[in-house]
Amino acid sequence: MPQIIFLPNDDLCPEGAVIQCEPGVTICDAALANDIEIEHACEKSCACTTCHIIVREGFNSLNDATEDEDDMLDKAWGLEPDSRLACQAVVGDEDLVVELPKYTINHAKENH
């Protein structure tokens, strides 16, 4: 079973986290199931960028990004070549190292 290593983030997981998840689960769902309250203002429908993440290791084991995801990522704060939307990135068979950016473009944070 692959693990996802979340690097420390001052707001969401100050000490970082290591979680186990089944292949086929999105990174967003895996995080939420393990009390990492990653933002997902569009309810995981690929309509915003609040769940933007940077995959530091294991990027190539994820499913390919769709054109819609790529279009949304163009609007993300701090976009990098290994950026994905956590609601669209499906875990494969490899371990991942994920960074949660410090900022999002969400102007009105919802309490999910």
Image (spheres, helix red, strand yellow):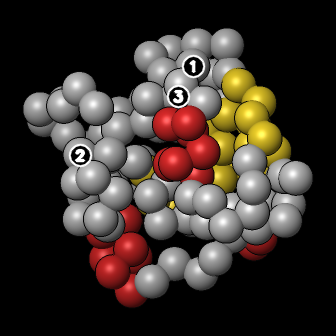
Cα distance, mark 3 to mark 1?
Answer: 7 Å
**Residue 45, position as x, y percentages in the image:** 29, 65
Circle 3 crowding by C-alpha within 10 Å: few under 14, some 14–19, many from 20: some
Q: Residue 19's image quarter?
A: top right
Badge 2 marks a residue whose secondary structure is loop
| Circle 3: residue type | Ile
Cα distance, mark 2 to mark 1?
Answer: 19 Å
Against 93, residue 57 (above or below) is above
Residue ID for mark 1: 13
Task: Tell me which label, 3 or 1, sits earlier in the chain.
Answer: 1
Badge 1 marks a residue whose secondary structure is loop
Residue 64 is left or right of residue 95, and the answer is left
Q: Do the residues under discs 3 and 1 have CB atoms within 8 angstroms? A: yes
**Residue 112, position as x, y percentages in the image:** 28, 32
Residue ID for mark 2: 41
| Circle 1: residue type | Cys
